[in-house]
Amino acid sequence: MADPWQKAYDFAVEVAREAGEEIRKAGECEMKVQTKSSTVDLVTKTDERVEKIIIRALKGEFGDGAFIGEESVANGQPCVLSDKPTWIIDPVDGTTNFVHGFPFVAVSIAFAVNKELEFGVVYSCLEDKMYKARKGKGAFCNDEPIQVSDVEEIKKSIIISEHGTDRRKEVVTKIFSTMQKILCIPVHGLRGSGTAATNMCLVATGAVEAFFEIGIHCWDIAAGAVIVQEAGGVLMDVDGGPFDLMSRRMVSANNKKIADRIIKEIEAFDVTRDDAPVQKKE
Ligand SMILES: O=P(O)(O)OC(CO)CO
Ligand SMILES: [Mg+2]
């Protein structure tokens, strides 16, 4: 078959749009907020409900397949990327923004086969921006082609960095030390939208030169990874090695020169891989 995944790609765009509509409506109602790994790792009924809507729609169209969804994993489902066609879903990327009414929230749906990402869809639903990309076929925002910035000089760049949800003092110290060093290169500015998926789309459109983070999960960045690459950008590990979707470490940039310069300043800290075996409780 010449183009086996086109139908899945088109369907993912429609599902992301419907999910975004649900999120917009839910944002207008009062919401009950719960916490996951820590008091700053938030989840709402909307996250869980929208993930179920997405998975139900995909199963309805394509049958039972492999799914890695943020809320399914939180409820004990495995988080292992196999060779099987696999949907990787973040129903609400930017849950903290959503809870606070900070206006950047995205639905992120990616699809991988043989552990390789085939396409990604990020719907920034409060801005009504539909980002999408398919391997080898370019990246788009609302159907217009997008491209990374051509800036090569770090001193002319804007860099996105987030703070994450790990509030251990040694981790926060490393995050701020890294940010300080990058700011003082100097760069034009540091930014952060509060959603990794949207941050990657900002790299892809050329609004910023790079976004890096340690501690994100595969569902935050899988769709954005395809979008950045198809917009002409690069993905790397924070130590300069190859990007590994399950490692929870990522630098995305408009080009390798900018990525390498940022990597020089990154103070890494340990995170548990997404696909690490779950420890059995004694
Ligand atoms: O809001 P979420 O889905 O928890 O994701 C955060 C990072 O983990 C923002 O990208
Ligand atoms: Mg997320």
Image (spheres, rainbow, N blue to C red):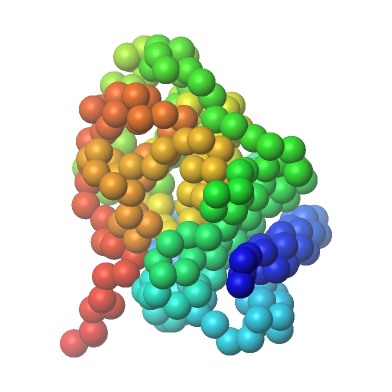
Which quadrant, please, contains the C terminus? bottom left
Q: Nearer the viewer, residue 5 or 236?
A: 5
Tell which residue pokes out farthest to the front in this image. 2
Position above or below: 176 against 241: above
Q: Nearer the viewer, residue 41 or 237?
A: 237
Position above or below: 251 against 87: above
Left or right, 113 with respect to 241, comes to right
Left or right, 188 with respect to 32, comes to left
Q: Measured from the top left, where is residue 281 in percent x and y?
A: 23, 85
Q: Measured from the top left, where is residue 212 in percent x and y?
A: 39, 38
Left or right, 244 with respect to 74, comes to left
Q: How many marks?
A: 0
- Residue 178 picture quarter: top left
* Residue at 51% in and 21% down: 150
Q: Measured from the top left, where is residue 188 in percent x and y?
A: 47, 14
- Residue 146 picture quarter: top right
- Visible in this render: residue 79? no
Which quadrant, please, contains the N terminus? bottom right
Q: Measured from the top left, where is residue 179 in percent x and y?
A: 34, 27
Left or right, 89 with respect to 76, comes to right
- Residue 58 picture quarter: bottom right
* Residue at 49% in and 66% down: 112
Position above or below: 169 against 110: above
Tell which residue pokes out farthest to the left in this image. 282
* Residue at 71% in and 84% down: 60
- Visible in this render: residue 268? yes
